[in-house]
Amino acid sequence: QEESNVPRIEGSDDISMSIRHLYKPVICKIQGSVHAGALLMVTNCTHAIAVENAKFSAPEILRGVWPHMVMAGLFRVMPKRAGLDFCMRGQAIDAKKAEEWGLINESVPNDQLDERVDSLASDLANLAPGTMQFGLEAYVNQDGMNFDEALPYLGKKSAETFAGPDAQEGISAFNSNASQVSKFRIQEDLFNRVGRKDQTMPRMMSSDPPISERLIRVP
């Protein structure tokens, strides 16, 4: 069995806590059923994709106990009424219901799981890594605030993001492309005015290389 590559938080052995404060895209690849405390890992990942035959449950009540710690993550992704019923009855739900309730992002056939996870990982890896990490940290921090606290906090973080290198690079690329498109349209208009519609228009292509960073996956 492979060891997890999720960095540990100093003074804590709780992997779900480490995942929550990693501030990077974390894909939970669910190849089987998830029960009890394992739900915490699912709820703290940024994405969760499961096979269609997976089952999910918090069965503690059936043994005379309560899923206290699971609630810390559960009610951050599931509707409260659905989550409470989930805890109160202890009955398993299927992947379709888990998707409907927001516990997972989607469910796929077994033979499509690897491909779907790899595709999502590729999409996320090509986005601005610095901004992604900064944004995920802000998301976690504002999660415990009320609206009046969250709004000014996020306004400050937004300004800091615009001043960051990823945003500056993106804005520069946008302005450059906008300038090129403007030149293209002027040239096209001139061709049309002089009746040279058969001329080949220059094709605009972005030359900006994708920005990638290794993602963390929970096996």
Image (cartoon, helix red, strand yellow):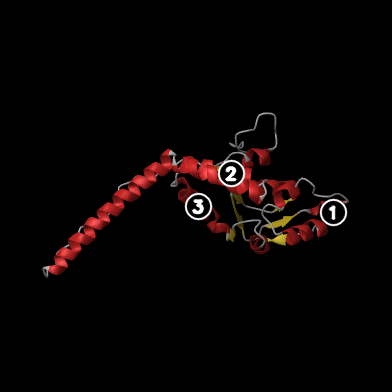
Mark closer to the chain start, 1 or 3? 1
Q: Is residue 201 visible?
A: no
Question: What's the distance in space between the residues labelled 2 and 3, CA to CA?
Answer: 30 Å
Name the residue at 46% across, 49% down. Answer: 122
The residue positioned farthest toward the top in the image shown: 11
Question: Relative to 24, is 84 on the left or the right?
Answer: right
Name the residue at 80% across, 49% down. Answer: 67
Q: Is residue 187 visible?
A: yes
Q: Mark number for residue 153?
A: 2
**Quadrant position of residue 111:** bottom right
Q: Amino acid at mark 2?
A: Tyr
Q: Mark number for residue 120?
A: 3
How many other residues sit within 10 Å of disc 2, few (<14), some (14-19) or many (≥20)?
A: some
On-image quarter of the C terminus? top right
Locate residue 206, reporting x and y percent.
Answer: 31, 51
> For the residues carrying marks 2 and 3, which lies nearer the camera in this image?
2
Disc 2 and disc 3 in contact, CB within 8 angstroms: no
How many other residues sit within 10 Å of disc 1, few (<14), some (14-19) or many (≥20)?
A: some
Locate residue 186, reporting x and y percent.
Answer: 20, 60
On-image quarter of the N terminus? top right
Question: SS of the residue at dot 2?
Answer: helix
Residue in front for this viewpoint, 8 or 190: 190
Locate residue 161, reporting x and y percent.
Answer: 48, 42
Q: Which residue is mark 1?
A: 61
Residue in front for this viewpoint, 31 or 71: 71
How many other residues sit within 10 Å of disc 3, few (<14), some (14-19) or many (≥20)?
A: few
Residue in front for this viewpoint, 206 or 64: 206
